[in-house]
Image (cartoon, rainbow, N blue to C red):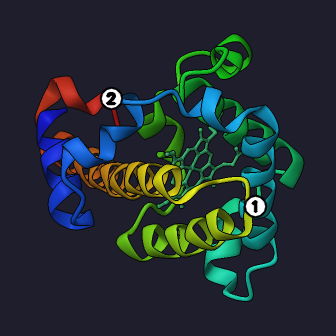
Amino acid sequence: MQWLHAQASVNSGVKQEDAFSIDKVNLYERLGFDTFVKLSTNFYTRVFEDDQTWFRTIFSNSTKEEAIRNQYEFCIQRMGGPPLYGQRRGHPSLIGRHSPYAMTKEAAGRWLYHMEAALDDTHEIDSDSKNRLFNFFKHTAFFLVAGKELTNNHRLVGYGGCKHRVGEA
Ligand code: HEM
């Protein structure tokens, strides 16, 4: 896990202490429920209308409404609010939940492009909160890319004859 965080810092340019500055203040108390709903709505409206088909189709197995709810419940919980995500979906397990998708550096870049614009469009978010949130998102996006690479490499090792890993693939 530490290797993944280190890799995420190298590829995102965000130090771990900056990525987790979200834990130094309670952003849920500062920003409130409705602001997170608005942020996720702004984000997924952009994603589902993206003119770059390769990126938009990564989300084609989800409805916009469910994607919005999954994201704002996760963010509210992670930013110090009630555990809405865990109560409905269980442990976030973000690497596992993203394993069906094309988690490339290009996808992380496009995801972050939309998220930065969504943060700018959500005027209730002050600049200090925006910096904290964006650093967290940026680091996590590249953490997920590194997690996908690691999973893929394990599959290859398993395929090459490492018996106990074959079942995991
Ligand atoms: C769900 C893609 C980055 C958190 C999803 C889904 C896709 C996806 C296709 C399914 C939509 C749904 O039905 O909810 C990506 C891509 C990323 C990325 C391509 C960048 C490379 C992130 C980041 C975070 C995140 C940075 C958090 C900081 C979540 C959460 C869910 C989700 C919480 C809901 C999972 C569930 O409950 O099933 N993502 N994501 N994602 N993503 Fe991401």
**Residue neighbourhood size for the residue with mark 2, other residues' Cα within 10 Å, grouped as few (<14), some (14–19), many (≥20):** few
Camera sees residue 137: yes
Q: Residue 92 at x, y = what percent?
A: 53, 26
Looking at the picture, which amino acid does disc 1 mark? Tyr
Q: Who's the residue at 82% across and 66% down the image?
A: 45
Q: Residue 100 at x, y = what percent?
A: 53, 49
Determine whether the beta carbon of the residue marked 2 sits less than 8 angstroms from the nearest atom of ligand 1: no
Report the quarter where the N terminus lies: top left
The residue labelled by disc 1 is 44
Q: Residue 79 at x, y = what percent?
A: 54, 30
Q: Who's the residue at 63% across and 73% down the image?
A: 117
Picture disc at residue 65: none
Disc 2 vs disc 1: Cβ atoms closer than 8 Å? no
Dividing the picture into quarters, in which one does residue 161 lie? top left
Looking at the picture, which amino acid does disc 2 mark? Glu
Q: Earlier in the sequence, mark 2 or mark 1?
A: 1
Dividing the picture into quarters, in which one does residue 106 lie? bottom left
